[in-house]
Image (cartoon, grey):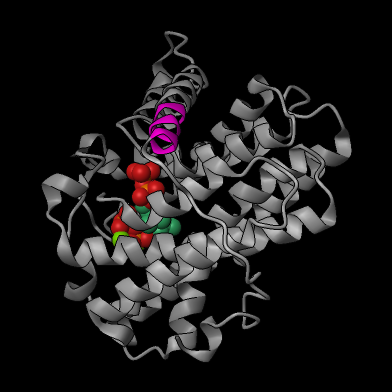
Amino acid sequence: MSPEQTSGGFMGQTPQFEASTNGAEETEAFRATMADDVAAISQALDTLCPDEGLIEDRLPQAMRYALGGGGKRVRGLLALQTARAYGVGRERGLRLACALEALHAYSLIHDDLPAMDNAETRRGRPTLHVLHDEATAVLAGDALQALAFEILADPQTAAQAEVRAELCLGLACASGYKGMCGGQMLDMIAESEPGFDRMTTRRLQARKTGALIAFAVESGAILGQASVEERQALRRYADRIGLCFQITDDLLDAQADEATLGKPSGQDEAKGKATFITHYGLVGAQAKAQDLAREAKLCLAPLSIETHFLLHMADFVFERDH
Ligand code: IPE
Ligand code: IPE
Ligand code: MG
Ligand code: MG
Ligand code: MG
């Protein structure tokens, strides 16, 4: 491991005692919970963009298209299950999950635009700008971003005004220039200025993908009004799975085919993008992703809550095939 990846490095102290997933039965239960939650999140998202029979309904229809199509719902699941662990009711938890997935769907629409990655497929279907046009795709992305904040600012999500404000602030930081957009800017610069060093590549990854995934976990703790200590431990877990998630995305981009991924593959190398593979090679990047998933699980050990789902999510993020 490099110095920035070791315990007590840039991500803070990793507890040394073991926490692990075990047993086929437990894995089976995790998969069943995941399938139920994915279906519930998808159903809730579908109802958020109502069709009123108006000419401008092309917009909610486009939003609904981008929200659908079989996303893994990783951010929504993390938010929902963390909130549940801290005693948040199902309805409020699902609203939180929808806010995260709406923000994520917006980031994907814009990421796929010709001005950015110029991708023609997403989740195994034509991208929104291919299906409609670029203007509709830009507007649907904008509207999904606004929808995410609308959901968080609604008392149906959290009764307490301070909790709603903290959720909005957190999502703004995770998605704006300090987070996803800042990372996407670095990603665009990486195309024309190759040769980013390891720390810059890590910052790129942490911002473009890690920040929103980390906030997904933290948002459940905010809604459940968890203690500062619990939130810090969760943050250490979330930072690691966030980085692990983008490394596996890059590994899949390099190794999987478009049919499996549901989106174009081989894009990073074709565009000369700096990824962990550029710095560590395929085997090294794979090892790093595995270390991060293992470390993430260790970070859950001090928590007071039931952590089975989060433990399994760390494995899922590393082992996923799309
Ligand atoms: C893809 O995210 C974009 C990245 C941040 C790497 P996901 O792999 O979570 O995409 P969906 O939501 O499952 O389609
Ligand atoms: C995009 O990263 C991350 C976002 C903020 C959407 P990628 O460009 O690698 O994501 P994919 O591979 O298109 O899903
Ligand atoms: Mg991109
Ligand atoms: Mg892309
Ligand atoms: Mg990618």
On the image, which quarter does residue 106 sit in? top left
Q: Viewer-proximal residue, 225 or 1?
A: 1
Task: Give coordinates of residue 154: x percent, y percent.
Answer: 74, 27
Q: Is residue 259 above or below residue 276?
A: above
Q: Residue at x 83, y 56 (%)?
A: 228
Q: Position of residue 240 (x, y in %)?
A: 53, 65
Name the side, left or right, on which 288 lies relative to 88: left
Magenta highlight range: 25-33
In the shown orientation, is residue 187 left or right of residue 117? Answer: right
Q: Is residue 26 visible?
A: yes
Asked if residue 254 lies left or right of residue 19, the reply is left
- In the image, farthest residue toward the front: 23
User: Total marks drawn?
Assistant: 0
Quadrant housing residue 192: bottom left
Q: Residue sitting at 55 percent across and 32 percent down?
A: 98
Q: Is residue 176 visible?
A: no
Q: Position of residue 233 (x, y in %)?
A: 71, 60
Q: Quadrant of the N terminus?
A: bottom left
Is residue 29 a member of the stretch shown in magenta? yes
